[in-house]
Image: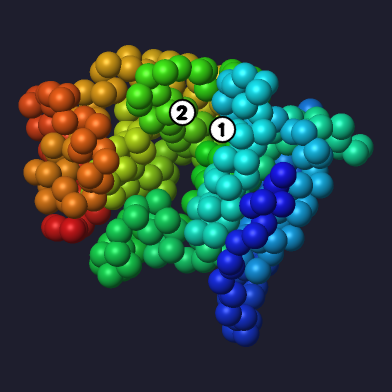
Amino acid sequence: MLCLAIAVTTCGVNAQSDSDTHDKSNFLDSLLNEKLEFYRHLYPEISFLILKGGDELVADMMALDLALGHQPSSLDYEHPPKLREDLMIASANRIVYMLQYSMPSASLFKADDPLGWQEHICVLTINPDEIAADSVQATRNLLDLPQEFIQNIPDDLRLQPTDYLEFVIDHEVYHCLQSMYVGPQEMSHKEFWGEYNHFLNEQGADAYAMGMHINTRLENSSFAKNILRIRGMALYSGDPDHLTCKALQQIFKVPVEDMAEMSAKEVFGTANRIREHVTISYDEYIQYLASSVQAMKVLGVEDLVSDELRNRIKDVQSDPAQVKELVTNTRRYLSELSCDEI
């Protein structure tokens, strides 16, 4: 079944001959492997599989097909048995899409008759060279804006590659851990149910990744503050579901010495409590979405709002006070990055 997803067109990756680039790539790969070994030791009941894409995309999907077996199932979404295969095809196509565009992602599956490895498999699509080769690339990966804008951000306000790579790994691992230990997204007929859960899950994932950063760095570092600023500009990228400032601010309220003493599993528990603390209702999310669209119009980036989304929320009234707050906060974070305009 997964072989259906292998019939894709991949773009070649130009070989890099520069020794510095090669050394940096090896360093990032080593960092990725060390982090995964940490999680494999911490959660021996889960197999962590890393896929990088690029020239390896077809081989990646064949390896995934082998690992999952003939009748695997997704553990990210609650579903009736009769839709297992449809959901797996959709999940496989999503993984292919993420690999083609070098986008980090996480998916949790239950393997069918695993051949000597764990039944639960966390599939991560992370290519260090594509997301964290330097500070410009790392910052642009999180803040989806033109490169010329990113280059105008002072270097000390950009995201440093190694810190960012670790943040991405922790963020994506959280999604697998949430599916495994908290549970899958429940079924619902509500129109925005998927987006609503995505918004809530991103709060938890960012809280966990930031908590892990503080846990190892023993401080609210400049990187942590820059993550907050960049997440605070999510509307400039047309991405209200990644506006996670409230969750990040809750992490910052935890005393550094308390965070430093936590185990990784305790950080996970803290992130889940923060996720619950900042959770809004489904109806509140719909209004937040409408307010975000109106705020993007005020910010001058209304072209980023798809016609489909406009039609879906056309009957939803935005909250003027919330629109004002979103615009004010977004512009403030833009100013803190020493930038005047997009």
Give the residue at mark 1: 175
Give the residue drawn at x 14%, y 58%: 341
Instruction: Name, please, the residue furthest toward the right.
Output: 116
Q: Residue at x 74, y 33 (%)?
A: 72
Quadrant housing residue 176: top right
Vertically, is 285 above or below 312? above
Residue 313's x, y, as percent? 21, 30
Report the amino acid beneath label 2: Asn
- In the shown orientation, is residue 78 left or right of residue 335? right
Q: Is residue 18 left or right of residue 158?
A: right
Circles 2, 1 touching at the beta carbon (< 8 Å): yes
Q: Earlier in the sequence, mark 2 or mark 1?
A: 1
Mark 1 element type: helix
> Closer to the camera, 218 or 50?
50
Gap between marks 2 and 1 measured at Cα:
7 Å
Up-down: is 172 above or below 113?
A: below
- Mark on residue 201? 2
